[in-house]
Image (cartoon, rainbow, N blue to C red):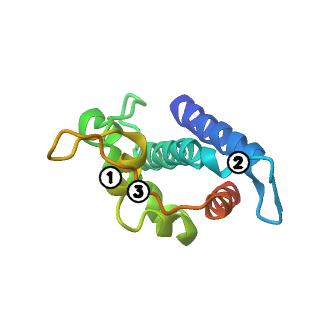
């Protein structure tokens, strides 16, 4: 594993460790964490999933004769959907089910504010409960 891959892996691990401390385990949940923070925790979880996809991409590269990696920076390394799809191919089904309507639909509704046709901010529609998120974090950490 090269230096970039280690950095990505450590960042993903740190995000999942933080979420684990906030949420607890499925068999020992942290009931002190109010459900009101599920958006924020989901945002961190989504970032961890995408970064994991970046790690999957980096691991798929092979070194050239000069021991360097040729990174498709614009269309792979930086592309959110590409990284997300790579991650979901390798992550447990429980995580795939959370994003069954697609990365952009669910994640962007939570992470961004958009405007409707009358220029009013859109409402966030969110169907993920804190227990499901807790299980996803647990499953991800125990790959």
Which residue in the protein does label 2 denote? 34
Q: As drawn, is 59 to the left or to the right of 108?
A: right
104, 126: nearer the viewer: 126
- Residue positioned 36% across, 36% down in the render: 64
- Is 84 rendered above or below residue 96? above
Report how far apart the C-alphas of labels 3 and 2 lie in the structure.
Answer: 18 Å
Element type where label 3 sits in the image = loop
Which residue in the protein does label 3 denote? 125
Quadrant assignment for the C terminus: bottom right
Residue that lies at the very extreme toward the right in this rendered image: 28
- Residue positioned 47% across, 50% down in the render: 56
Mark positioned earlier in the residue sequence (3 or 2)? 2
Mark positioned earlier in the residue sequence (1 or 3)? 1
81, 98: nearer the viewer: 98
Report how far apart the C-alphas of labels 1 and 3 lie in the structure.
Answer: 13 Å
Q: Residue 104 shows which numbered tag? A: 1
Mark positioned earlier in the residue sequence (2 or 1)? 2
């Amino acid at each position: 594993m090269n230096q970039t891959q280690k950095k990505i892996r450590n960042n993903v691990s740190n995000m999942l460790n933080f979420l684990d401390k906030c949420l607890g385990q499925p068999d020992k949940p942290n009931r002190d964490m109010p459900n009101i923070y599920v958006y924020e925790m989901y945002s961190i979880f989504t970032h961890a999933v995408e970064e994991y996809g970046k790690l999957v991409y980096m691991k798929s590269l092979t070194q050239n004769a000069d021991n360097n990696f040729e990174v498709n920076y614009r269309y792979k390394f930086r592309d959110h959907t590409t990284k997300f799809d790579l991650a979901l191919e390798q992550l447990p089904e429980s995580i795939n089910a959370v994003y069954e309507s697609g990365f952009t639909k669910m994640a962007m509704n939570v992470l961004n504010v958009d405007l409707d046709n009358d220029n009013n901010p859109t409402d966030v529609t969110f169907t993920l409960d804190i227990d499901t998120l807790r299980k996803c974090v647990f499953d991800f950490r125990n790959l």
